[in-house]
Image (cartoon, rainbow, N blue to C red):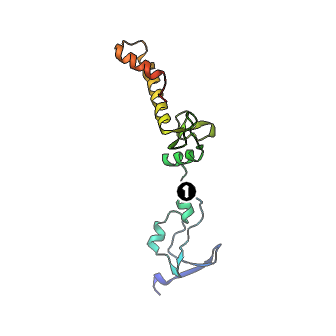
Amino acid sequence: MSRSKLLLPFVSSEAWVTRWIDDPVRLCLVCEEPLTRKRFNGRLEDRTRFLSRRTCGQSCGNFRPEPSLDGYRSRARKLRGDSCERCSKTTDLHAHHVNGDVTDNRAENIETVCASCHIAGHWAEKRTHALRMLGNAVVPQQTRFALDLLSQGAPS
């Protein structure tokens, strides 16, 4: 009898499943359940495919312990309001992280702003940072005038 035809029946949580004797006992990387070869339309999963699998199914395969930046941003968009908190505009809304940390999606850290207020807010942050860095440095009069105009706020 050839080695490929030796099957060992055992009971799994779902039903009677056959497993190759040579198949190693492997665990899912996420839930740590034992991996078994699946059946698709009555055909046993290819052994090479089984050995390359790292998770028991789609739900474990899609699990991400640490979300990506896009994941954090989409979570923040769910907390976004219906209108801009600065100018009451209702179109082109963004979710702005008040403390600048995109991983901090607490409701009190998310501010709903329109695109123009969002950009103006970030420009204001950069301006105050630049002014702090300049301190008492000698700045040409035209630049000082432009910085003073910017410090009065974004035009409405």
Residue at the image point whose x is 47% and y is 87% from the top = 1
Q: Is residue 58 left or right of residue 130?
A: right
From what the image shows, is residue 35 above or below residue 96?
below
Q: Is residue 27 visible?
A: no
Q: Nearer the viewer, residue 38 or 19?
A: 38
Q: Tell me residue 146's x, y (percent).
A: 39, 20
From what the image shows, is residue 25 above or below residue 10?
above
Residue at the image point whose x is 63% and y is 40% from the top = 107
Q: Tell me residue 137's x, y (percent).
A: 38, 13
Query: Circle 1 sits on which residue?
Result: 63
Q: What is the quadrant of residue 89 in the picture?
A: top right
Q: Nearer the viewer, residue 111 or 155?
A: 155
Q: Tell me residue 129's x, y (percent).
A: 45, 24
Q: Is residue 13 left or right of residue 122?
A: right
From what the image shows, is residue 125 above or below residue 44?
above
Q: Is residue 146 visible?
A: yes
Q: Tell me residue 134's x, y (percent).
A: 41, 17
